[in-house]
Amino acid sequence: MKRVFLETYGCQMNVADSELMAGVLQRAGMEMVERAEDADAVILNTCAIREHAELRVLGRLGEFAHLKSKNPALIVGVAGCMAQHLRKRLLDQKRVLDLVVGPDGYRDLPALLQRAANVPTAEIRLDRDETYGDLEPKRQPGVRAWVTVQRGCDKFCTYCVVPYTRGRERSLPLADLVRQVESAAAQGFCEIVFLGQTVNSYHDGTHDFADLLRAASAVPGVLRVRYTSPHPSDMSERVIAAMAECDKVMPHVHLPLQSGSDAILEAMQRTYSITQFEDVLGRIRAQIPGVAVTTDVIVGFPGESDADFEATRAFMQRARFDSAFLFKYSARPDTRAYKLAETVDETEKGRRLQVLIDEQHAISGEIMDGYLNRTIEVLVDGPSNRGKADQPPQLYGKSREFKTVVWPDDGSPAGTLQQVKIVGTTHLTLLGESVGTPRPEPLITIGVS
Ligand code: SF4
């Protein structure tokens, strides 16, 4: 078996896991291919967070069943959270599936694939010690390297499957992570994005997340450092200070709120009250000038009353997040909330969601309008796919606050910092015109008095 097709669903941590798997497979002499039709083995790296993602994966397995009917030697595998979460059901689908491998089984993937060629194979044990800290991923091309700093989660929010699918929280040693950052920088990646389920609870026994941010921003070749997603309860003064003091740590925090009601936060077991969240938000905004704060909110959690929803709505008006990922609650098997009776029907969930979407769009639009006529630093990602065939080519990149900026192609190379003047906005995108590369630091002149 030589050629492997790997398809990724879900969050950025899954994308990083796919890069890890690709590294493991290539070191074993296997080749990654772009089309399932060209592969000896296909692996779906899956997500179990929402029912919708699972349904998409099951639909895709149906397509692979069709491929396998034409090529019976094809190995079909499922990896990731869904493999862990739905292991029994997946193994029952023997007519399609040859391999099920959970998030802690990737180190042995080449051997597992070889075995699956002969006998249906499952590796779904969770391993409290596995961090893959010593394995080099095969990164997708681009300017941004995603570096997983911890695996698993200890928070056990009542609606979430992650602690069950990815196991308990463990952090990679800081030295391993600095080595990964150095390696990524040497390959030309100039922005590092640290990933973890509760990334700011990172602690390797000696160093905390603030130490990691400071260490990464000191690595030569690194222009920017970001992270996602922190947990509000773990947002320490040390992390806020590291963000405030390190110019290369970008002023953007994705701080998941989930609900604006204390009763619902407690039912979700989020471990903070609205007052505590507001306190964290206030400290972040006071100490990090110009910081962008984005969030996640779930509507329709079991027991969410009109008053609870109105509390969320009011809080979002008060907090004025730069943007928000807004979701309808979706009950996941194996979670504690799954046992709770649903009290908000789909129509009402949809109504609540739409109210928040409309109000957040207005707030996001106002915040974006605040960029008009400002000249800002942008890291160039490359050509924008927004440009239509009959329009002049455009570039896109990210502001320091992680806002997407699009401007006419001025030949700026990917991976460089450019100055762009903002001349238009949408609620999602800043539209700019080029001003050129940043001026070098002025020579220091010593005044004589
Ligand atoms: S913090 Fe809560 S929502 Fe986030 S991964 Fe852990 S259990 Fe899930």
Image: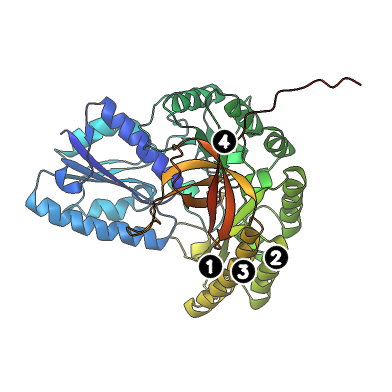
Q: Which residue is mark 1?
A: 340
The answer to whether mark 3 and mark 4 are in CB contact below 8 A is: no
- Closer to the chain start, of discs 2 and 4, is 4
The answer to whether mark 1 and mark 3 are in CB contact below 8 A is: no
Q: CA distance from mark 1 to mark 2?
A: 25 Å
Amino acid residing under circle 4: Val
- Label 4 crowding class (10 Å Cα cut-off): few <14, some 14-19, many 20+? many
- Closer to the chain start, of discs 3 and 4, is 4
Q: Which residue is mark 2?
A: 315
Q: Which residue is mark 3?
A: 362
Pick out the residue farthest to the right: 449
Q: Which residue is mark 4?
A: 225
- Closer to the chain start, of discs 3 and 2, is 2
Q: Secondary structure at mark 4?
A: strand
- Closer to the chain start, of discs 1 and 2, is 2
Amino acid residing under circle 2: Phe
Q: Pinpoint residue 266: horizontal percent, then vertical percent.
A: 66, 60
Q: Is residue 301 left or right of residue 234?
A: left
- Closer to the chain start, of discs 1 and 4, is 4
Q: Secondary structure at mark 2?
A: helix
